[in-house]
Amino acid sequence: MSPEDPAADYLLFTVPYSVDLGLPSVVLKVPLDELKELALRPVRWMKLVAWGILGCEGDVQDAQRVTLDIDLDFSNLKPGEYTFVPAEDATFCLLNLDHTHTPAKSQASQKSAAYKCPDPAPAGWNTVLDGRDGDHCVFSGLVPPRRAHILPQRFSHNTAALQSLSAQRGFELSHHLDPENTISMNHSLHDDWDSRRGFILATEDRFLRNSDIPPPSGSPHGTPTWQARHEPQGETTTYVWQVIARRQDEEGFARLFVRANERARFQNPGSPALPNPAAVNYVYAAGMVREYLQGDKPELLALLSRPEPRIHAPDMEEMDDARSGDAFEDMDAFEFLFRLTHKGQFLDYYENEQRLAEEDKARRLREWRMSLPERHRDHA
């Protein structure tokens, strides 16, 4: 079924956005039969997506402004218009689509020279992921997997976004290479994830629970060792691979490798480095916006993508006693963020990478000078 099919039953879901930023309300037009494949409790799904868009709690009301029960099922939900009403004391941290997708290779990168920095992969990073994921795609059970980022890799260079989302959304992601921002996937799923043809949902009691997601059907894929792993049950946080059935039929991607609504099976489901649920669902909500946004879609998508301004390190008086000895005034914004998030844990690594970069720059300069005619070397 096409989303333009006039005979289909739709849910029109309005999320009020920001007049101050020149952004109209976000209206999602979701076919009910597709939503049934994503979640068994539509109000819980709407509240999760609204949280991803606005960063706050609230209620879902119908066209008569009646607040809907969060556990309402589809048998009691009619096609029509529904609106998210933020709580009276809500504070907002608006969705920025620029945070949530990797641009196509034809698009210019938004990284500038000022943002470039070494990748401080902690010692044992791969060991943590191998111990947690077991060197398998956690959704399909196939080997070998790729390391896929929840928040895009280029996001690590946007210091303003990292700070604001860590503070306001509680991501607690110190760097894009940290294991909690990475998950092991088969190469086909990884491609679909990067292009947002596949989605990862993190279930929590706060919004959607594991029991609110339809179970996968058919036999699982992957190796026997992966199939023997514990399949998540109950209401603990689970990570679910989702696809839009219409797109899967039209584009023919990844369905041979993984079942829809497959739950991730980790080798160590108790790892403290599991992906951050808030970050997972932030990206999930962005995917639903891209999929179902109504109106002048290119213009609205452009409005919802707002490059963050560069931040500056605060004055010395704003730092606590534990960090008062560092020279923050002259510190590059990324180094400042690096020190705050890593608490000095990998600072030696960072400074050594800086030293190596300076040595390489000096070496290249010497080679360039030596390549000049002798009479010009002293003036270069």
Image (cartoon, helix red, strand yellow):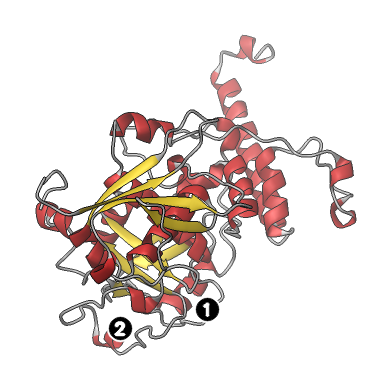
Query: On screen, 175 above or below 106?
Result: below
Mark 2 crowdedness (10 Å alpha carbons): few <14, some 14-19, many ≥20: many
- Give the residue type that dot 2 points to: Trp
On the rendered structure, is 350 left or right of 301?
Answer: right
Give the spatial CA distance, label 2 vs label 1.
17 Å
In the picture, the disc for residue 271 is 1
Q: Where residue 226 is drawn, which disc sits there?
A: 2
**In-front residue for pair 220/120:** 220
Question: Quick one: label 1, few (<14), some, or many (20+) residues within 10 Å?
Answer: some
Q: Where is residue 368 in the image (x, y as percent from the top left)?
A: 56, 23
Q: Which amino acid does label 1 sit on?
A: Ser
Q: Identify the disc placed on residue 195.
A: none
Q: Give above or below for 83 relative to 121.
A: above
Question: Could one spot residue 207 in this view of the protein?
Answer: yes
Give the quadrant of residue 148: bottom left
Seen as rendered, the residue at the extreme front is 64
Residue shown at the point (62%, 46%) measured from the top left = 164
Residue at disc 2, secondary structure: helix
Residue 363: % across, % down: 61, 34
User: Where, by quadrant of the figure, is residue 255 drawn?
Assistant: bottom left
Q: Which residue is drawn at 27% across and 64% down?
A: 77
Measuring from the top left, give residue 296's x and y in whole percent.
Answer: 29, 30
